[in-house]
Amino acid sequence: MEVWQKFVSFVVFLLCCSALTEAAGYVKYKDPKIPIKARVEDLLRRMTLAEKIGQMSQIERLNATSDVLKNYFIGSVLSGGGSTPSPLATAKTWTKTINKMQKAALSTRLGIPIIYGIDAVHGHNNVYKATIFPHNVGLGVTRDPNLLKRIGQATALEARATGIPYVFAPCVAVCRDPRWGRCYESYSEDTVIVKQMTEIIPGLQGDIPKKTRKGVPYVAGGRNVAACAKHYVGDGGTHNGINENNTIIDFRGLLKIHMPPYYDAIAKGVSTIMVSYSSWNGVKMHANRFLVTHFLKNKLRFRIMIPYNYPEFATDLTNLVENKAIPISRINDAVRRILRVKFTMGLFEKPYADDSLADQIGAEEHRELAREAVRKSLVLLKNGKLPIKPILPLPKKSNKILVAGTHADNLGFQCGGWTISWQGESGNNITAGITILNAIKSTVDPATKVVFSNHPRAADVRSGKYDYAIVVVGERPYAETAGDNTNLTIPAPGPSIIKNVCKNVKCVVVLISGRPLVIQPYIGMIDAFVAAWLPGTEGQGVADVLYGNYGFTGKLARTWFKSVDQLPMNVGDKHYDPLFPFGFGLTTEPRK
């Protein structure tokens, strides 16, 4: 009996000490010296159902008022494509906006910070004057993981400069059909290349420490961001390339083609994975318990999942839990994963934005890196009508040259979708950068007369006495479903510009596009043909290679088809008959 009394007295003593400690201001989950797992559990046990559901909610910036953040205990805020605090918002404007939201979140009972996320799919692309890198379709051409890592580092710094610690990137889809409107977000049709390009993750997040357990998220510090591998899984293999449609493939094929990039992403400590809106064999991925719960969470032992959720689901979810339709254990599991990311990122210790990084937006070293990426992403598919008479590299000194086409002097077209706005824009005032026309003008000899015409007439070309012409045409910007395309022809007036120019003067055609397009009807009249993809703001990289400051090195990471009737057609298929095969690309030597 005496032993029992002593034990009870000891327990009472511990409880009193604990109460006194908390009364004195010590809260276990706020102590950075405590292991993350213990901090998560301590915070979780203090949370009400409403607070847990709030942590599972991710709302758009426009809805994130102080009252909403406080009353609904919101856990995450995002900027969708084009969602900015104001037109041409500066880094300071961004940080001020996000800090105001953070202040509201920290004023709640438990003071759980929000995590702010943004689509940064080719640089910090929502932000005015940020560095816009080539889209993934071009980066896959480089086959250069180190380049991707450096791009990740630069993107992380520019995101942090605006107070944003979380980016919805990279897209690790394996695009198997270029008719898909998101194909330019994919590095390649080849799984091996996509796996290699996941090196952007340690660029964004920092190198994961050695001997770290597989599947545990990692963010190195205040100059890095949490990354998000997307869209799990098979989104690049939908039937006929229809966005968010059905991927028809057996489990073995799914594991062989679409799953491997996620193995690499998890091994590199990716913080979150976004589930796709597409289906696998008729079952929506969000409802696929086998692939999400059994395979991703249990078999691959992935620790964290932050899905896109919206505030209107809070009431429904509360009712489902209270009516025992959803067990509280499921809610606790989801909230644990979210809190683990926040603790891992150090948000509880440093919740506010760091204004000292403002000069990282569009920093010169980042623009030079983007220019390097452009050079390495270009693919030379034809160089001269006769192999013994290559036309590239072009001479810098000539009497008069023609630069023609809708995409030669249009920065918005050059960057593509997901640039400043969701669908992308037209024009040269949307952000800071160098158009291909201006890059050519700054590269040629001052004595060379450069004439620009958006859509020249054939007669004017014939009478112009040009030494050669550079034609820049291609697709207009698009994103997601708006980019689904069943014909993949070069949009008008591109074909007529090619004909008017290339039938009358020696010409180089530079195609700006998010995927291969139908080029076979025109390839015979073209002297040299360059696939430039969507190069971003640093058009000088195109001129660097056209004029021989650097050589062409890029090799196709996608099959270039002859006609859309062949699609889908990928390397390794039985009936593989492309115009230009996967891996093709002519090379040139830099001009000495």
Image (cartoon, helix red, strand yellow):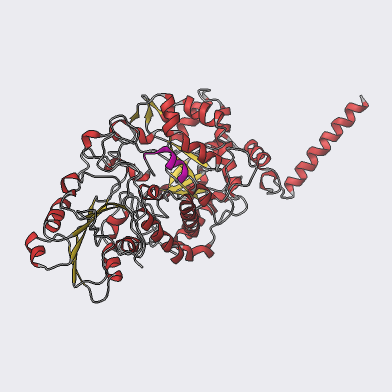
Q: Which residues are magenta?
A: 189-197
Choose between 34 and 371: the one closer to the eye: 371
Residue 311 visible in the displayed image: no
Residue name at image x 55 percent, y 25 percent: 327
Q: Quadrant of residue 548?
A: bottom left
The reply to whether the magenta stretch includes residue 193 is yes
The reply to whether the magenta stretch includes residue 541 is no
Q: Quadrant of residue 282?
A: top left
Choose between 262 and 2: the one closer to the eye: 262
Choose between 488 and 500: the one closer to the eye: 500
Residue located farthest toward the bottom when viewing the structure as drawn:
447
What percent of the width, then of the height, locates residue 464? 11, 68
Residue name at image x 30 percent, y 66 percent: 439
Residue 569 visible in the displayed image: yes
> Quadrant where the N terminus lies?
top right
Choose between 542 and 383: the one closer to the eye: 383
Q: Name the side, left or right, on which 28 lies relative to 340.
A: right
What percent of the width, then of the height, locates residue 349? 63, 52
Q: Is residue 397 above or below residue 265?
A: below
Counting every numbered tag in the picture gives: 0
> Quadrant where the C terminus lies?
bottom left
Q: Is residue 554 above or below residue 485?
A: below
Q: Name the side, left or right, on which 382 lies relative to 238.
A: left
What percent of the width, then of the height, locates residue 467? 17, 67
What percent of the width, then of the height, locates residue 225? 52, 51
Residue located farthest toward the front when viewing the structure as drawn:
388
Residue located farthest toward the left when viewing the structure as drawn:
459
**Principal secondary structure, stretch drawn in magenta:** helix
